[in-house]
Image (tube, rainbow, N blue to C red):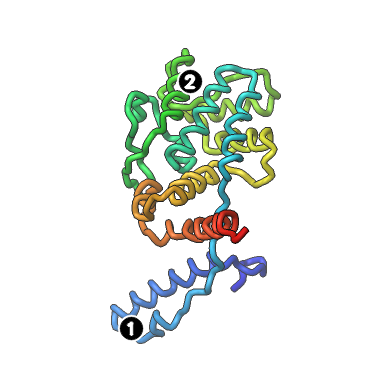
């Protein structure tokens, strides 16, 4: 299957097209129009999704790298962002949409509106609560957004970028992605890190430490447990490595 330029479509895109065709064929069948049976259109098999996550020592290095930021308010904000991502497993868009009113830092949990407009509960670790409290205490602005840009001496290009972000009344998802990558580089982590890597790390950490798949599904806001099952491949690999390390005749 090719696109308008003659290039091969990605398998996942091919699947979307086939699913749409199946739906159309089913519609025709309901209208008693003679057509090909929808079941005869098979979905292309897609390779197993690869999940990239951070090891405990990489998480530690990432958080420690925040100390390299010289601006106090920016440093407090960035630490709060990292702590919140790892504590809750939020999607970057969900994090960017948070307001001060939506997160009560005196409580261990708050509600978040995720994909499909579904509301779920997210939980705050002690470290995330402390980091958020310190950041909000240092702020002197009236913005309702939980995370906002803090102006420093930057290039004209970056200042224009931040002006666009301020129009949205808070940090954009793109800005949060840049923040995570900034500290990954400072920590010497060679993996391609994004906020979603911390979401993967959150889920993997829970499963390795004994959480059940259904609970992790709820915390991630997955509508289907099939989506959550991508992490079982990761944890199975982890168990294999633990077995090799600790089970020996020597």
Q: Distance between the Cα atoms at labels 1 and 2?
A: 63 Å
Q: Is residue 58 left or right of residue 123?
A: right
> Which quadrant of the rendered structure holds the C terminus?
bottom right
The residue where tag 2 is placed is 135
Label 1 vs label 2, nearer the camera: 2
Q: How many marks?
A: 2
Q: Residue furthest top?
A: 140
Q: Nearer the viewer, residue 211 or 98?
A: 211
Q: Nearer the viewer, residue 105 or 63?
A: 63
Q: What's the residue at 66%, 66% (across, down)?
A: 5
Q: What's the residue at 69%, 44% (across, down)?
A: 190
Dot 1 falls on a residue whose secondary structure is: loop
Q: Residues within 10 Å of mark 1 (few under 14, many from 20)?
A: few
Asked where in the image residue 227 lies, by quadrant, the reply is: bottom left
Q: Earlier in the sequence, mark 1 or mark 2?
A: 1
Residue 96 lies, with reference to residue 26, above or below; the image says above
Residue 146 lies, with reference to residue 3, above or below; the image says above
Q: Position of residue 1 (x, y in %)?
A: 59, 73
Tag 1 and tag 2, C-beta contact below 8 Å: no
Q: Is residue 14 left or right of residue 228?
A: right
Asked where in the image residue 36 lies, by quadrant, the reply is: bottom left
Residue 177 lies, with reference to residue 8, above or below; the image says above
Q: Nearer the viewer, residue 138 or 206?
A: 206
Q: Position of residue 31 (x, y in %)?
A: 29, 79
Q: Residues within 10 Å of mark 2 (few under 14, many from 20)?
A: many
Q: Is residue 14 left or right of residue 107?
A: right
The residue where tag 1 is placed is 33
């Amino acid at each position: 299957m090719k696109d308008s330029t003659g290039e091969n479509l990605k398998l996942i895109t091919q699947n979307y097209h086939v699913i749409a065709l199946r739906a159309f064929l089913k519609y025709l069948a309901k209208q008693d129009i003679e057509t090909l049976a929808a079941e005869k259109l098979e979905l292309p098999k897609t390779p197993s999704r690869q999940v990239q996550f951070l090891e405990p020592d990489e998480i530690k290095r990432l958080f420690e790298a925040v100390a390299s930021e010289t601006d106090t308010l920016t440093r407090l904000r960035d630490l709060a962002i990292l702590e919140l991502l790892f504590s809750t497993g939020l999607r970057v868009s969900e994090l960017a949409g948070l307001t001060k009113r939506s997160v009560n830092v005196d409580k261990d949990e708050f509600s978040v509106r995720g994909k499909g407009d579904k509301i779920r509960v997210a939980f705050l670790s002690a470290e995330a609560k402390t980091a958020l409290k310190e950041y909000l205490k240092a702020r002197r602005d009236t913005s309702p957004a939980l995370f906002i840009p803090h102006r420093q001496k930057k290039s004209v290009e970056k200042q224009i970028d931040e002006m666009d972000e301020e129009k949205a009344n808070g940090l954009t998802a793109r800005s949060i992605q840049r923040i995570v990558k900034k500290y990954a580089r400072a920590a010497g982590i060679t993996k391609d890190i994004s906020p979603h890597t911390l979401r993967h790390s959150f889920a993997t950490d829970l499963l390795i430490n004994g959480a059940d798949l259904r609970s992790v599904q709820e915390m991630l806001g997955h509508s289907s447990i099939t989506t959550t099952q991508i992490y079982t491949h990761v944890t199975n690999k982890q168990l294999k490595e633990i077995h090799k390390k600790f089970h020996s005749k020597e």
